[in-house]
Amino acid sequence: MTEPDFTLSAGPTMAPPRVLAAQAAPITYHYDPAFLEAFRRTERKVAELFRTKQDILLMQGEAILGLEAAARSLVRPGMPVLNLVSGVFGKGMGYWLAAFDAELHELEVPYNDSIDPADVDRFLDEHPEIELVTVVHSETPSGTLNPVGEIGPIAKRHGALTLVDCVSSLGGIPIWPDEWQLDVCVAGPQKCLAGPPGMSLMSVSDAAWEKIRANPSAPRASFLSMLDWKEQWLEAGKFPFTPSVVDLHGVEAACDVILDEGLEASFERHERAAAACRAGARAMELELWPASDGIAAACVTALAVPDGFTDVQVRDHCRERYGVMISAGQGAGNLVRIGHMGPTARSLYPVIGLAAVGRTLADLGAPVKIGDGLEATLAALSHDDRVSAPTS
Ligand SMILES: *Cc1c(COP(=O)(O)O)cnc(C)c1O
């Protein structure tokens, strides 16, 4: 098959030219002074994106590695942990926690809904023994957002640490480890940052390091060891192993693109693209997957697939007939997702995504009001004179 014309997936997403160019830089020895400088610079840029004074850990593997490393490092057998589940990634964290022999407690809501902080507060009141709360910020498969800004301080007040999956948030949706009192946050470069997949961008609080150091089960001499990175690289300037030289340059360029644009401008752009897409989907008479707009994530619009059709069928038809790559439901339900990440959260990309979904459903025989939908999206975008503000 030929390359797609538009990658409007839920990540990896289209990377801007600056990222692509950076990935073509010469491959250097990892102790080359220029590479060492680039690595430290990139850590500082990721810290800027998180607006944090905490340690930044750039682990060398797609964000699942960072999430697993954090869970393994924090959890010791028998530790009481509260896992908040509102979707596929929250559920997956629970499987890990159980496998690492945590004493697992879960608060679960339907996969089109979001966690109520009051429920977390009540649960922690009733279970003061909980030492760790795990939560997903942007549940990408469901297109929903959890109120991590409220959950962080609640956990802290109850003496529990937090581990946050913000893989799809960084750069596109506000996530503030310091202000929200979060202990370990794990982000990915291939979502709103529009960089290459292959690294885990993490913030780690002093309290988290203390917990990890005190945990005899925390990985050591392992690809999954956060402590190895802390002691060898952050403290002694020696890499535990050769980092991903090419991806590091791509991640730095991806940070530069967002920092040059300005974080707030980037957040607003992602929000506008998602709002325009939602307006169009409604006018097209499609059903939005999230229970309310208030919990809809800005990085992806999730649309329920009409009865009688499947998510994979819609995704594949979009790609094969129109060259537009969108995402299916990834286990969250019968839904498809149009990504608004990095470059695809600007210009008329939301129109293209919605046109592809609408026309696909019509081709398959579903009743949709394509024209009304596209008009509504275009109208929403036309109200904004920054719609094509360059990002690279
Ligand atoms: C993308 C993503 C991950 C990484 O998972 P993959 O299956 O490797 O893509 C983890 N958590 C969330 C919320 C994500 O969006």
Image (tube, grey):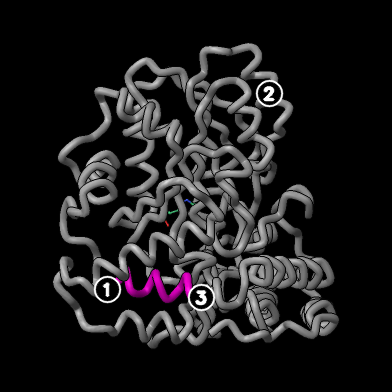
Is disc 3 surrounded by few (<14), some (14 to 19) or many (20+) residues within 10 Å?
many
Q: Is residue 81 above or below residue 137?
A: above
Which amino acid type is shown beneath numbered disc 2? Answer: Asp
**Residue 305 visible in the picture:** no
The residue lying at 17 percent from left, 67 percent from top is: 30
Residue 118: give x, y in percent of width and height: 73, 27
Kind of residue at badge 3: Met
* Separation of residues labelled 1 and 3 (CA atoms): 25 Å
Dot placed on the residue nearer the N-terminal end, 2 or 1: 2
Residue carrying label 3:
325
Residues in magenta, as a range: 245-257
Q: Where is residue 370 in the image (x, y as percent from the top left)?
A: 77, 79
- Inspect the magenta stretch and tell me whether residue 244 lies in it: no
Separation of residues labelled 2 and 1 (CA atoms):
44 Å
**Distance between the alpha carbons at the discs numbered 3 and 2:** 40 Å
Residue under label 2: 121
Mark 2 burial class by Cα count in 10 Å: few <14, some 14-19, many 20+: some
Disc 1 target residue: 246
Tell me the SS state at disc 3. Answer: strand
Residue 247 lies in the magenta stretch:
yes
Q: In this view, does 67 lie above or below 306?
A: above
Q: Which residue is drawn at 31% across and 65% down?
A: 39
